[in-house]
């Protein structure tokens, strides 16, 4: 047996000479051996020391080997259980294997090389069990940490866990945030959540949609104006900058703002000062800036829609909102929310989506994202009666042909890249000016996540591997093997 394998084995047999022979056989193999002359003594050892493999004789006085291993299976299910047995007892042993009480058996008398091989195979199986246990524990932690709903958002998809974590991590900061994502993904909800989770929550959250305000009025909307400064300015008026003092100013669709005005916005951000239109007086405010665009930022810069210096000034922290099609089953949850809401508004009775409707919602690509889904559900509620929202009703609102509907209902949804590469978010994200939140280079493999969890546990426990193993709910030998593999 390879010396580099670190494992613990317990031999239980009422004949001391057999224990001596087994101990001699496995001497200098790197295996830690424990021996017991009765099942009761074996249980005492197991209560104090985790072992990878238990090898027990079948016929012993008091508690026999079958009863002993059955008890081990209940108390320590991840310990590999092997029976030493004579040929005449094989029927009982095979029955025990089929029922899951033992993993395998070894014949008495045994062949030394065969016994070593069987133990080697058992160690390999033990490692598989330990790996599975650690993986299950890691995934359980991931699921526990998942936020099912967050602020005004609906959905618990992997993609949105990144967004929720980003909002929580940077909400308390003064740093500017730049939100990207296609139209209808909920950029204003992100900005609103950032404000409500920040120390500025008691001040105003002011939202300006740069695409909805005529360019000739935009400067006044942001900075305000004094009476008589232009035609129609019949009185002094405060702008968004004054109203947002101490709070948050959200500049939505920034790429639609006049390029000349963007220079004034840049100076405003840099100095915190501005002048109202028609005034010579400098005013100073304290504002946290959040910006958003549905354009790809570098393409907008290249096309002359966005100043590069303004982008880098505002892009201290980046948050990218995924399209609805990459949000696993969130679409169905969101559809149910809108169905309940519009049922109340339109005074209709809808109890839910049919099974086919749920499949259609999840498989449709939703190019208009959440906004399109919202409008589709609203239209469906208005144009039909309950109590179920069916796939046929949705297909009609989406103007799908029968063939298109059938294709979507029969489509097997492929997991997104985020689903395949989920990274637990228990580690703080290091944001910087050039940090793009959806950069796939930040996604780690499961092996890296596992190693990080183990190394963190060992570090927290001051290099006490036994204590670290207890926290991770695995055997110490599993951690020893892992560390040994990383060192090779």
Image (tube, rainbow, N blue to C red):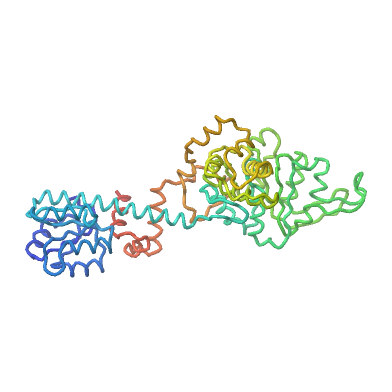
Whether residue 299 sits left or right of residue 103 in the image: it is right
Whether residue 67 sits left or right of residue 205 in the image: it is left
Quadrant location of residue 28? bottom left
Q: 88 or 259, which is in the foreground?
A: 88
Q: Where is residue 177 drawn, in percent x and y? A: 64, 50
Q: 218 or 415, which is in the foreground?
A: 415
Asked if residue 392 is positioned above or below residue 442 in the image, the reply reads above
Q: How many marks?
A: 0
Q: Where is residue 111 drawn, in percent x and y? A: 8, 50
**Which residue is drawn at the image coordinates 75% and 46% (left, top)?**
265
Whether residue 329 sits left or right of residue 63 in the image: it is right
Whether residue 417 sits left or right of residue 380 in the image: it is left
Q: Where is residue 270 drawn, in percent x and y? A: 72, 50
Q: Where is residue 475 drawn, in percent x and y? A: 30, 60
**Which residue is drawn at the image coordinates 77% and 39% (left, top)?**
260
Q: 98 or 281, which is in the foreground?
A: 98
**Which residue is drawn at the image coordinates 39% and 61% (left, top)?**
459
**Which residue is drawn at the image coordinates 24% and 55% (left, top)?**
100
């Amino acid at each position: 047996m390879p010396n580099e394998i670190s494992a613990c084995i317990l031999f239980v047999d009422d004949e001391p000479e057999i224990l001596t022979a087994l101990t001699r056989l496995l001497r200098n193999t790197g295996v830690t051996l424990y021996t017991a002359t009765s099942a009761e003594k074996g249980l005492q050892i197991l209560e104090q020391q985790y072992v990878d493999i238990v090898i027990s004789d079948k016929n012993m006085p008091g508690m026999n080997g079958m009863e002993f291993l059955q008890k081990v299976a209940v108390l320590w299910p991840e310990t590999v259980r092997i029976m030493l047995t004579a040929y005449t007892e094989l029927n009982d042993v095979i029955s025990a294997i089929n029922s899951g009480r033992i993993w395998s058996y070894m014949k008495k008398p045994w062949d030394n090389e065969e016994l070593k091989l069987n133990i080697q195979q058992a160690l390999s199986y033990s490692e598989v069990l330990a790996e599975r246990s650690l993986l299950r524990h890691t995934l359980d932690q991931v699921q526990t940490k998942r936020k099912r709903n967050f602020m005004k958002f609906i959905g618990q998809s992997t993609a949105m866990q990144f967004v929720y974590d980003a909002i929580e991590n940077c909400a308390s900061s003064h740093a500017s945030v730049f939100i990207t994502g296609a139209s209808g993904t909920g950029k204003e909800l992100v900005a609103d959540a950032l404000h409500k989770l920040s120390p500025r929550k008691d001040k105003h959250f002011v939202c300006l949609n740069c695409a909805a305000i005529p360019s000739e009025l935009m400067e006044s909307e942001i900075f305000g104006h004094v009476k008589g400064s232009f035609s129609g300015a019949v009185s002094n008026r405060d702008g968004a900058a004054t109203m947002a003092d101490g709070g948050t100013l959200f500049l939505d669709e920034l790429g639609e703002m006049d390029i000349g005005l963007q220079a004034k916005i840049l100076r405003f951000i840099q100095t915190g000062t501005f002048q109202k239109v028609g005034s010579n007086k400098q005013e100073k405010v304290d504002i946290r800036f959040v910006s958003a665009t549905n354009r790809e930022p570098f393409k907008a810069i290249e096309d002359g829609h966005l100043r590069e210096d303004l982008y880098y000034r505002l892009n201290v922290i980046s948050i990218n909102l995924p399209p609805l099609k990459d949000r696993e089953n969130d679409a169905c949850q969101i559809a149910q929310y809108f169905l309940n809401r519009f049922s109340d508004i339109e005074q209709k009775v809808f109890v839910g989506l049919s099974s086919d409707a749920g499949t259609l919602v999840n498989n449709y690509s939703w190019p208009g994202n959440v906004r399109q889904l919202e409008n589709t559900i609203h239209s469906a509620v208005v144009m039909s009666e309950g109590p179920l929202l069916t796939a046929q009703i949705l297909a009609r609102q989406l103007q799908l042909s029968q063939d298109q509907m059938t294709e979507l209902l029969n489509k097997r949804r492929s997991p997104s890249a985020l689903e395949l590469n989920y990274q637990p978010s228990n580690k703080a994200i290091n944001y910087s000016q050039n940090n793009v939140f959806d950069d796939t280079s930040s996604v780690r493999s499961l092996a890296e996540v596992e190693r990080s969890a183990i190394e963190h546990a060992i570090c927290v426990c001051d290099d006490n591997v036994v204590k670290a193993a207890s926290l991770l709910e695995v055997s110490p030998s599993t951690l020893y093997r892992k560390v040994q593999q990383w060192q090779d």
